Image (spheres, rainbow, N blue to C red):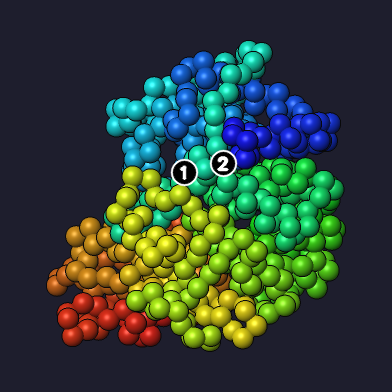
Amino acid sequence: MGLYDFTFYDLINRNSACYEDRPAWYEVDDGRSLTFGMYKEIVDRFAYGLMDIGIKKGDRIGVLGKNCLEFFLLYGAASALGAIVVPVNWRLSTDEIIYNYIDSEPVCLFVEQQYQRIIEENKHKMPSVQNYYNLKIDGGDFIDIGFLMKNKGELELPDVSSDDGFVIIYTAAVEGNPRGALLSHGNMMLANLQLNYLFGLTTEDVHLNLLPLFHVGGLFMATNAFHAGALNVNMSKFNALKAVELIAEHKVTVIFDFSPILSAILGENERTGININSLQLVLGLDTSETIEKYQERTGGNFFCMYGQTETSCLATFGKYNDKPESAGRVIPMAEIRLVDDFDHPVETGQPGEIVIKGPMVFKGYWNLPKENDHIFRNGWHHTGDLGRFDEEGFLWYTGRKAEKELIKPGGENVYPVEVENVIMQHPSVEEVVVFGVPHPKWKEGIKAVCRLKAGHDVEPSELIGFVGELIASYKKPQYVEFVNELPIKSDGSPDREKIKELYGGPQE
């Protein structure tokens, strides 16, 4: 570390000194708990084990599995060596998972037992991988992760800077393949400090870690709580009843919410009568009905936001009650403009593309220099999202640019073109347009409007199942409608806006 640098590993050292005996992590599945001092001790031994097998600064380390203590320890150990963690969404299809590892070229993989068959059958496609480990101790047929921790942890640390890579998080494919967003130690540290400042977190807070650690929201909420000296209570997978019980038992104060998480928690709270009033801080995206019900029932505050993986999760932030349904105001360490197609600023109240600059903007997409040149043009990160500012400086999100249209079911990113490309592989489909529609559970659902080939017939359920076999199940449409003709524009392409006008809206 240079004189002016501060990395995640430096934070681990700092917290061990400041909060040595305070609880840092509680593992719900097996009851394991660590103090900040214990976390540093194990991270040092883990890092030494990684160094002993040849892991060096800049190497990528892949991980595939649900949230667990070992997952978070891996982030710490990798940060000590300047290695970059590549966490992959376990909900993806096999082809998507393997593509992410082919693209990022990790030198080793840590895999939870239930996903090891997928990796075993595709080892020949990943020549960069030299070693395969169980993600959990005694957790599968690969090398035991505990083998890497059987040492004294006497490290000789490389020089790792704030600007060095910390994690590559793969985002949905706008067209073609997913893109790996490279986030630095500095990105993560600034995200932590922003949230600590805006939330006012202290060592007395408790974060229920219920979003996956492969998601920027899950990872940075966990590091944010860690940074504040707060306790992370970790769930391997969200369960609403268990979440309610944990909130009551551990006096949880803060969570990150994507619909339908909060509504499910409120439902179980209402059914069981278990007290969740300690939950005073909720950040995320949800319906006004759910937000207002939560605030009325608990007296807590819901905070709205706008952000992307590429902006280290946050770009705007604000209390829901300050301007209901807005995305809040620009955070202190970011500058946002709204621009037209020529990068000219638009007037207040007018919609434009959201462009951002500041230290929380990511380092770029892995192995995509042309894409990076384009999105960082004129010195700004071009998000592809549209919004408008009101007179008081609140941002109102209005959608995606046409070429980067995005659907967000339950907080996941799904690009219509990716789903359309899969549907077009079905032998009965001649033409298709995919777009987002209101959904009672996920807030936004996926609909496919299809024109079939002459003489062909297919059931909606069959087409939905076909998509689910080729890409992640959360990307398959919930709704399919067959039509005789699709409206087209003068250039012969489908008129997407007209199609959405005709077949969008609430679905039966």
Q: Indicate whether 147 appears above or below 280.
A: above
The residue labelled by disc 1 is 168
The residue labelled by disc 2 is 162
Q: How far apart are marks 1 and 2 (CA)?
A: 15 Å
Please state if 267 lies on the left or on the right of 83 as rendered.
right
Instruction: Please provide percent x and percent y for residue 57.
Output: 48, 29
Q: Determine the residue located farthest toward the left in the rendered image.
A: 454
Pick the front one: 104 or 416 = 104
Pick the front one: 87 or 119 = 87
Please state if 231 lies on the left or on the right of 220 as rendered.
right
Q: Residue 94, can we see it? A: no
Instruction: Please provide percent x and percent y for residue 455.
Output: 15, 71
Pick the front one: 349 or 246 = 349
Residue at the spot 67% in from the left edge and 62% down from the top edge? 283
Q: Indicate whether 433 appears above or below 315.
A: below
Name the disc covering residue 44, or none.
none
